[in-house]
Amino acid sequence: MRGESAKKSEKLEVIRKLLAKAERAATPEESETYTAKAMELMARHGIDEALLAAAEPGRDVPGGTTIAMTDPYSSAKARLLAWIAAALRCRSVLHTRPGGRVAAVTVFGFASDRERVEMLFTSLLMQATAQLAGQRPAWPDESVAAYRRSWLHGFAAEVHRRLIAAEGRSAAEERTVPAGVPSTELVLADRAAEVDRAFAAAYPHLPTARPARVSGSGLRAGMSAGRRADLGGRRAVGGRRRGAVPAG
């Protein structure tokens, strides 16, 4: 067990270093190099953890992690987190304040997947925030705030697409499966079903959130930034409205 724990820590440390390098990259091309490697390692780590958990019942169980959101653009930031979570086999619940601002997001899934979600979100939010201040619409009569919200939406959508692709490639790779464990495909299907059951039990009366509406023209620029992004404060929230977040 100690050996496996040490290997896991080493893998996560490599991923963290790749993410940190991407955040400091001098050019988009350099950032993209670190991006591809971080995505690959993160996806493989997730599959490896899923297979180990299948061989050791009780090793990894579904639960929730609540992450605070901050203004400005709290809803767009929450969307980024929710789409990362969906790509990494987790569910999400938004905790909103009056007026629609998002106070926090609860990510629900297996502990190993939640760890991946939080690591990626922290890095990607830093990358997005660093670029956001320089984003302005081409037309002077367009709202800067609306443009930046749509930019963040595009960024999140492209990150989601890339993570889905990376997870799919990793799941399709040939790998040694622990004795007594079914195929990778069946393990992932079983975990998804277990997360759905646990989520339904934890939030039996949760309404389905409406899809996000985007009015600004920054979507395409945000998607371009999301293609270059590296993919390599929790607190409980009560007394606020909650809604499940759709994956798309």
Image: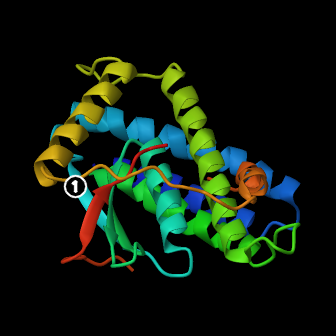
Is residue 185 found left or right of 63 in the rendered image?
right
Q: Residue at x 29, y 58 (%)?
A: 243
The answer to which of 20 and 62 lies nearer the viewer is: 62
Q: Is residue 144 above or below residue 106?
A: below
Q: Residue at x 38, y 21 (%)?
A: 185
Task: Count the numbered circles shown.
Answer: 1
Q: Residue at x 52, y 62 (%)?
A: 121
Residue holding disc 1: 63
Is residue 219 found left or right of 114 in the rendered image?
right
The answer to which of 152 and 177 lies nearer the viewer is: 152
Residue 97: image location, x then y, percent: 33, 78
Is residue 47 found left or right of 173 in the rendered image?
left
Dot 1 alpha-carbon crowd within 10 angstroms: few under 14, some 14 to 19, many 20 or more: some
Residue 150: image location, x then y, percent: 66, 60
Q: Is residue 116 above or below residue 195?
A: below
Q: Residue at x 53, y 28 (%)?
A: 168
Q: Is residue 221 above or below residue 193?
A: below
Which image quarter: residue 182? top left
Residue 133: image location, x then y, percent: 75, 79
Residue kind at label 1, given as amino acid type: Gly
Residue 54: image location, x then y, percent: 25, 32
Query: Which element type, helix, strand or loop, lies under badge 1?
Result: strand
Residue 8 visible within the image = yes
